[in-house]
Image (tube, rainbow, N blue to C red):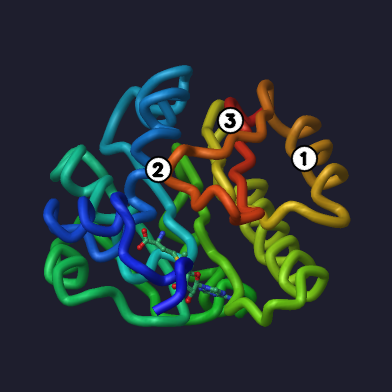
Amino acid sequence: MTAYNKPDHWSIRAQKEGYPARSVYKLQEIDGKFKLFGRNGARNSAGPLRILDLGAAPGSWSLYILKKFGQGVFLAAADLSPLSLKASQLFSGANVFFVQGDIYDETVRSALLEKGPYDAVISDAAPATTGNRSVDTSRSLALAEAALSYGEAGLRAGGNFVVKVFQGAGTGEFLKRIKERFTGAKSYKPEACRSNSFETYYLGLGKKD
Ligand SMILES: C[S@@+](CC[C@H](N)C(=O)[O-])C[C@H]1O[C@@H](n2cnc3c(N)ncnc32)[C@H](O)[C@@H]1O
């Protein structure tokens, strides 16, 4: 077992708390710090909070949202892979919608955008890594750009956006694009990110009209 895949504090905690992935603590920290859902105008006055979760499998972010808001949320999610059993069991009511498919696919995109507009679009989508940093960062940036295009088309004015990016060529320009479209834009690396990883999260707070 390498140091990278050895279970760490966060993975052990996730297992104990019933989450399929340690990534839940990244979203929890970002949400705690920036009040992604339900504050800063990121909530419609009527109806449930509407959230779109891209790259959702195995389902920790979705579980966090469903645990936090229960029936007070409509959650749409997509991933190439299926959700874990625990997450998929929660994806059975009228307030949830999961598509197993590629977020670049037009049919997947239409199906998800049809369920909007959303109060928040969050994306933890990441490519399968190759170990070649420039290949990995450019694939990650392409996914992040696809997520931003969902935010542009599917977020209501005032809505919030969070996206994972592997830092590298082009990510500075990408953050500038977020700044143009949102009242606030930030780069934030939660503590639960592995210290040696080059992933970070970009946030767009308050989509401009
Ligand atoms: C780090 S995992 C997400 C973990 C998830 N947020 C959770 O809390 O369980 C990244 C996910 O991105 C998904 N992904 C990568 N490329 C994708 C694509 N083109 N369309 C949909 N999902 C994609 C992968 O299948 C993988 O499940």
Q: Please tell me which of labels 3 and 2 falls first in the chain.
A: 2
Q: Nearer the viewer, residue 35 or 49?
A: 35
Q: Which residue is mark 1?
A: 175
Instruction: Indicate if the residue with disc 2 has its beta carbon within 8 Å of ligand 1.
Output: yes
Q: Check disc 2: other Cα within 10 Å, few if <14, some if 14-19, many if 20+.
A: many
Name the side, left or right, on which 180 lies relative to 128: right
Q: Which residue is mark 2?
A: 27
Q: Secondary structure at mark 1?
A: helix
Residue type, numbered disc 1: Leu
Q: Is residue 98 above or below residue 166?
A: below
Q: Which mark is residue 13?
A: none
* Mark 2 to mark 1 CA distance (whole Å): 19 Å
Residue type, numbered disc 2: Leu
Q: Please tell me which of labels 2 and 1 falls first in the chain.
A: 2
Where's the N terminus, which quadrant?
bottom left
- Measured as percent of width and height from the top left, residue 27 is found at 40, 43
Residue 51 in sight from this viewpoint: yes
Q: Is residue 17 above or below residue 3?
A: above
* Mark 1 to mark 3 CA distance (whole Å): 19 Å
